[in-house]
Amino acid sequence: MCLESGSWFLQPPGSPLPLPLLLFLLLTGHSLGRSDPLPLVINTWPFRGATVAAWQELQTGGSELDAVEKGCSWCESNQCDGSVGFGGSPDEFGETTLDSMIMDGTTMKVGAVADLRRIKNAIGVARKVLEYTKHTLLVGESATQFAENMGFANEELSTNTSRFLYLEWLSHKCQPNFWKNVIPDASKFCGPYKPTRVLEQQLHTSEKINIHSHDTIGMVVIGKTGHIAAGTSTNGAKFKIPGRVGDSPIAGAGSYADSTAGGAAATGDGDIMMRFLPSYQAVEYMRNGVDPTLACQTVISRIQKYFPEFFGAIICANTTGSYGAACNKLPGFSQFRFMIYNPLQSQPIEEKVDCI
């Protein structure tokens, strides 16, 4: 049986789980009743230190939100893979900016910041947005001003490493970049750019985000009582156009949590993935009884239909502690690695899935 052969494969979130899909799950070994003990910490990529930090926060009495904040903060401070925190992913002006969000799956409250400048602890600022405002998302210099008012230090985010990356990029005629349909030819020259009269439909290869140019810390934490929180933090795509905001700070795109259903977090090409709200979709599939692995695979398959060469992955966990992940298979990216920690383990475990 082919999952994609029937219209029931991509049922709208919130609709009952079709009988053919239930049968498929059972025949292919997907257990609808499998559960793992709680609490659970799961995060994208082999960022072990972030997993440990979140787990230790839970063990010392911290809340699920506290654990997500602590885990993502660890990556911000330690510049996980250069893709999180200060000193990475300079934009076209050479500046490092940060995006982050945190979500409480019990109250459905969200705090987020985007294009945050000169503040190192982005997830901390996002938490303050959740706790001290009636807003969901603050951006740019205004987000920085808010952070300063909340007591965060104004600090330089650029480092020698990020400055070197920027100068090297300039020396290669600003390749790669994210422009199209402009003059001068963005595949050969630096800007400033102006629009052309003729619009081309195909993106040139330099516009594609891949595993070597971007990833994100995305985390889901489920407490002993089933409360769920999720969050993300990133410094975005390298050499992005200033002002660009990706999926990470967008609820339902970068991550999503609902204590009645589950949590999910995505990583990859945020410009593409945010158009599909993959984290929200995955949680809604889990609400309908789909196990986490298949929920993750389903949202990846949906994006594949429109962008078969997109770079992306997603982690999913339901209210019982069952978890899974999925990724889009590309040359050089055939497996996705992620971290989990639950009471079955004496230490965090790195797991991997084959991409589809």
Image (cartoon, rainbow, N blue to C red):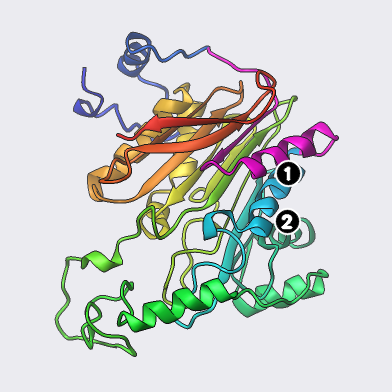
Residue found at x 46% / y 49%? 267
The numbered mark, 1 or 2, whose residue comes first in the sequence reads 1
Position of residue 262 relative to residue 249, above or below, is above
| Residues under numbered marks 1 and 2 in contact, where contact means CB atoms less than 8 Å apart | yes
Residue found at x 43% / y 81%? 167
Position of residue 263 relative to residue 175, above or below, is above
Amino acid type, mark 2 = Arg
- The answer to whether residue 52 is magenta is yes
Measured from the top left, where is residue 335 in percent x and y?
37, 36
Query: Which residue range is magenta in the image?
Result: 34-63
The C terminus, quarter of image: top left
Q: Which residue is mark 1?
A: 65
Q: Which residue is mark 2?
A: 127
Neighbour tally class for label 1: few under 14, some 14-19, many 20 plus, Cα within 10 Å: many
Observer-nearest of 95 and 39: 95
Position of residue 276 relative to residue 347, above or below, is below
Measured from the top left, where is residue 186 in percent x and y?
25, 80
Per the image, label 1 sits on a secondary structure element best described as helix
